[in-house]
Amino acid sequence: MNDTLAAVVITVSVLAGVAMIGLALLDRRPLTALLGGLLVVEAAALVQVLWAVVAVLRGERPDSAGVFTGYALASLLVPPAGALWALAEKSRWGTAAAGISCLVLAVATVRLQQVWG
């Protein structure tokens, strides 16, 4: 697992999550910029998972392959779920759900690093 890439994913996720929760506190509705932020977060998660797949193909292995796979799949599914929730719920709570999904990705990335090590 690439620690630099994981740090980028965590940083992007936390920044996007805090910004979205800030918008929710200001009673802002889901905006195009919010969904753009979720796309950036999802792209970072996708790059991270692809990096891990390549590492596994090269012979490296996480300590627990099943747990790692679960966190990897969750990291890919959580941001789109947050985006769908934000689009379906046109209130501050949709914006908050999108922000929380970004923070969940940051936690999942930390767990990916721990399981890999």
Image (cartoon, grey):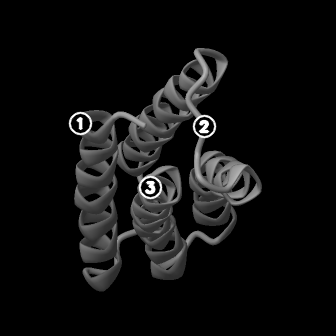
| 2 or 1: mark nearer the eye | 2
Task: Where is residue 81? Give x, y as percent.
Answer: 67, 58
Name which residue lies at 51% across and 65% down.
101
Which residue occupies the foreground of this view, 76 or 109?
109
Task: Where is residue 111? Give x, y as percent.
Answer: 48, 64
CA separation, marks 3 and 2? 16 Å
| 3 or 2: mark nearer the eye | 2
CA separation, marks 2 and 1? 18 Å
Residue where numbered disc 1 is placed: 4
- Which comes before the other along the chain, label 3 or label 1? 1
Badge 3 density bin: few <14, some 14–19, many ≥20, Cα 10 Å: many
**Depicted 113 relative to depicted 28: above or below:** above
Callouts 3 and 1 close, C-beta under 8 Å: no
Badge 3 element:
helix
Which residue occupies the foreground of this view, 46 or 35?
46
Which residue occupies the foreground of this view, 94 or 46?
46
- Amino acid type at circle 3 is Thr
- 76 sits to left or right of 34: right
Name which residue lies at 54% across and 23% down.
55
Residue where numbered disc 2 is placed: 61
**Depicted 66 relative to depicted 55: above or below:** below
Location of residue 19 by image quarter: bottom left
Badge 2 element:
loop
Badge 1 element:
helix
- 11 sits to left or right of 35: left
Badge 1 density bin: few <14, some 14–19, many ≥20, Cα 10 Å: few
Task: Where is residue 79? Give x, y as percent.
Answer: 56, 53
- Which comes before the other along the chain, label 3 or label 2? 2
Task: Where is residue 60? Give x, y as percent.
Answer: 56, 29
- 16 sits to left or right of 95: left
Quadrant of the image for the N terminus?
top left
Name which residue lies at 46% across and 73% down.
100
